[in-house]
Amino acid sequence: MKTSALAIWSLVTGILGFCCIGPFGILPAIICGHMALSRMKQSGGQLGGGGMAIAGLVLGYLGLAL
């Protein structure tokens, strides 16, 4: 199973947005996370990384709330 690059980017930008760069990382984390989850559903199990995408989404939404 291949890990989704969008899931990795969601996690990375979520961490950076939450800790360092603020909204410039938060919005891409949310967008990439949703896109990654959508592509994983469409792939029929060929793509992995759902946990990373969800973690990026959580960090993105937490940063947006704060």
Image (tube, rainbow, N blue to C red):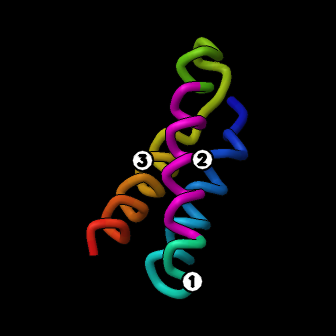
Q: Residue furthest left?
A: 65
Q: Distance between the residues labelled 1 and 2?
A: 17 Å
| Image marks 1 and 2: residues in contact by CB distance under 8 Å | no
Q: Where is residue 64 in the image (x, y as percent from the top left)?
A: 35, 66
Left or right, 23 with reference to 59 = right
The relative height of residue 4 versus residue 11 in the rendered view (above or below) is above
- Which of the numbered marks, if any, corresponds to residue 11? none
- Residue 9, given in percent of the width and then of the height, sits at 66, 56
Disc assigned to residue 21: 1
Mark 1–mark 3 contact, CB under 8 Å? Answer: no
What is the number of callouts on the image?
A: 3
Q: Does the magenta stretch include residue 42?
A: no
In this view of the protein, which residue sits in the foreground, 8 or 29?
29
In which quadrant of the rendered image does the C terminus lie?
bottom left
Amino acid type of the residue that numbered disc 3 sits on in the rendered structure:
Ile
* Amino acid on which disc 1 is placed: Ile
Q: Where is residue 62 in the image (x, y as percent from the top left)?
A: 31, 66
Look at mark 2 in the image and give the residue it sits on: 32
Which of the two marks, 1 or 3, is nearer to us in this view?
A: 1
Q: How far apart are marks 3 and 2 (CA)?
A: 10 Å
Residue interval drawn in magenta: 25-38
Q: Which of marks 3 and 2 is in front?
A: 2
Secondary structure found at label 2: helix
Q: Name the residue under label 3.
A: 54
Which residue: 53% across, 59% down? 27
Dots 3, 2 in contact, CB < 8 A: no
